[in-house]
Image: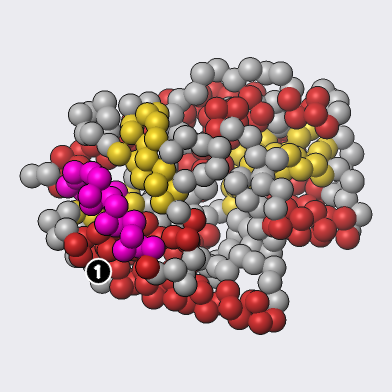
Amino acid sequence: MVDAGYPLVLIAVAKTGIAPQEVVEGISVARILQDDIYDVKQSRCFDRSSDQIIQSYTFDIIHVHDQVMLHLAVTIKRKKPTVKIIYDSHELFHAWPLNTNATGFTYLKSEIVRFLLKRREARNIKHIDALIAVNEPIRLDILDFFSLKIPSISIRNLPTLPPPANHQDLLRKKFNIAATDKILVYIGANIYPKTINIEQVIREFANKEHVFMVFICALNWGQKEVKKYADSIGVTNLYFHDVVPIEAIPDHLCDATAGIVSSWNKKDLSYWYGLDNKLFEYMMAEIPIVATEQPEYIKIVRDHAIGICINPEKESYFDAFEKIAHEPSAYQGKLKAAKSILNWENESLRLLDFYSELAK
């Protein structure tokens, strides 16, 4: 967007130890929001933050990525009615499950908070001027669910083309995995129990000879619950690795045998319609993919022939992995071809065209 001549200011939440003001790749970053913006009880913070933004910056468009920032944008628009709001929804929030290990009264409180936030999104979304969704099923669902008649487009959250990965066997060295052993890798900011079907993956791969699982994710409550499950069934070939910087992802993934996208969740449409970033991270690292037969995964994995899609109610993740491991070279040319098409350099052109149309 900066290269196309749009002056941008990124408003972010302040973090200890990170500069409050800086320029990153031509974008002015202002970390002026406080953590209380995520506290549903602290509604006054939106008035304070909106006043600060209006007084500090000149702008015509607010581009927001989640329902919290949408609420801030709508608060600003009430005070500055000429501003346009673009809701760039990276998830289907109204159909997102409550990922928590809370029980009893704490769980009930979480349910109440989720209800209030969903109601707030439904109220605020009526004030947006345009919608961007991460894929076509989510775009159509949001338009239909909220009865919206506004300009909209689906733009996938594709990575930029990275430099060639350095094959340094980072995972093998860290976990002492032999060069002849096979690795199934999972990567994600978080890993959630009982939601993404990861338990079935663990059962199928448990203690397979010369096969290891490495899950790269935040070492938080979700990871601890998944580890607890693996320990309860005696799994010894599963390792956990903390999250890595974005620029280091290809180097960590590139020597794995295959990457897993395990979600098989028809109950929660946010997952069923999902298009996980990890799928493209595997592609950029040029490792084949084992994924489930969900609408958006099929379009990428099967249509570009960069892995195998299965129905885990009838088929095995492990069998698909074994087929890939038996003939890994069959996917290399397809992976290179796919990443030359499915990248942000190409996808961003659609975003620029959309902005141009809105400006007319």
* Picture layout, residue 226 above or below residue 24: below
Could you say which is closer to the camera, residue 140 or residue 351?
351
Could you say which is closer to the camera, residue 10 or residue 144?
10
Q: Residues within 10 Å of mark 1 (few under 14, many from 20)?
A: some
Could you say which is closer to the camera, residue 281 or residue 206?
281
Q: Which residue is mark 1?
A: 126
Residue 319 position in % (x across, y down): 74, 45
Residue 174 position in % (x across, y down): 80, 29
Q: Residue at x 34, y 56 (%)?
A: 49
* Picture layout, residue 172 above or below residue 79: above
Q: Is residue 294 visible?
A: yes
Residue 333 position in % (x across, y down): 54, 23
Magenta-drawn stretch contains 52: yes
Instruction: Indicate left or right for 277 with 201 as reference.
Output: left
| Secondary structure of residue under mark 1 | helix
Q: Quadrant of the C terminus?
A: top left
Magenta-drawn stretch contains 194: no
Instruction: Indicate left or right for 230 with 122 as reference.
Output: right
* Picture layout, residue 152 above or below residue 321: below
Instruction: Indicate left or right for 202 with 158 as reference.
Output: right
Q: Residue at x 60, y 59 (%)?
A: 264
Residue 349 position in % (x across, y down): 27, 33
Q: Residue at x 91, y 54 (%)?
A: 234
Question: Which corner quadrant of the image does residue 1 belong to?
Answer: top left
Amino acid type of the residue tagged 1 in the rendering: Lys
Q: Is residue 307 visible?
A: no
Which residues fall within the magenta stretch?
A: 45-63
